[in-house]
Image (spheres, helix red, strand yellow):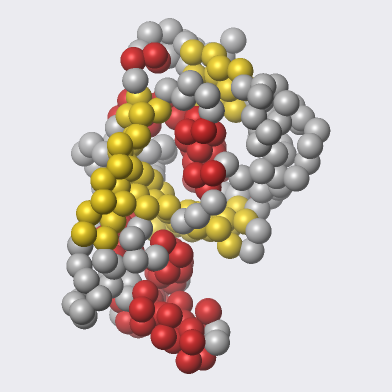
Amino acid sequence: MTLLDYVLKVDIEFAQHMLEERGDSSFAVGYAAVEAFGHQSVKDNPQFQRIAELSIALGSKPEVYRLTLKTMNTVNMTVIKHQPVDAPKLMHKALIIEIVQNDTHPLFKGITDLGMYPKDDGFILIGMDRRKEDPKIVESRWTPTWAKRTKISMDSGPAYWNMYYQLEEWARDAVRFILALALLNETKSSPLSISNEKIKIGNKKDRNQHHTGLVIHTIEIDGKVENGSLEQIERNSNRLAPQWNYTILGTDSEGSK
């Protein structure tokens, strides 16, 4: 099963009803998780409550970003040198990221599916390795610091991320991956090409169909990064720090310039 498969099991209308009845979001999420996955599964795997929370955050038409293998490799080879001044647009709402090809290629080390949703001035990250018969699900909270206006050197890593070094290794990799993808998506002359498809998967009268549709964003890379390296310097965006820049390394390169 994919992370999306798990998300679609959650009855978000039931969760909303419980929230209105009890006025407690944690209570509503817990009940929605139990209703979708069973009491014992939720007891044994608290991550199922995070999946329920992700499903509620995604709403009736989840946003899913499917990356080609070339896109995934490009994102993994992107080096972020300076901080953005606030959250990139891609990170303003809940989403799921997954590989578009077969499930033998993870997005990054040990993670084939990545979910993210904003919560309490930060983000909840959910990772899954669907290549295993019993999929491994991990979750972590990430609290970035966007407000600093002064550029902070990243020579020794993304030091401006609050709590960054307290994250587990998978979560640090997830932060790098999703932030690189989000920043690449909104720079001028972005190498990303995105096609959108709306898919109807049910209706509100169908008790077994908790979501009414999907929005699938397939992300591909155009020809500009096939050979060598690409350097892009963005100086004119009000959202990005002055002289914010990144480097995409080609497959023949071993380091950034």
> In the shown orientation, is residue 84 left or right of residue 204?
right
Give the residue furthest to the bottom. 21
- Identify the residue at image location x=39%, y=65%: 59
Residue 136's x, y, as percent?
36, 56
Query: What number of labels is visible?
Result: 0
Q: Quadrant of the N terminus?
A: bottom left
Residue at (21, 59) in percent of width and height: 200
Choose between 172 and 248: the one closer to the eye: 248
Q: Quadrant of residue 214?
A: bottom left
Q: Quadrant of residue 105?
A: top left
Evaluate whether residue 113 shows in this view: no
- Which residue lies at the image location 78% right of the left edge and 41% below the top edge? 148
The residue at the far right in this view is 150
**Residue 179's x, y, as percent?**
54, 39
- Taking the image as shown, residue 133 lies to the left or right of residue 168, namely left
Above or below for 15 versus 174: below
Residue 62, by quadrant, is bottom left
Q: Position of residue 50 (x, y in %)?
A: 46, 66
In the image, is residue 44 above or below residue 197? below
Q: Which residue is rendered at x = 48% and y = 16% of the image? A: 249
Q: Nearer the viewer, residue 241 or 83?
A: 241
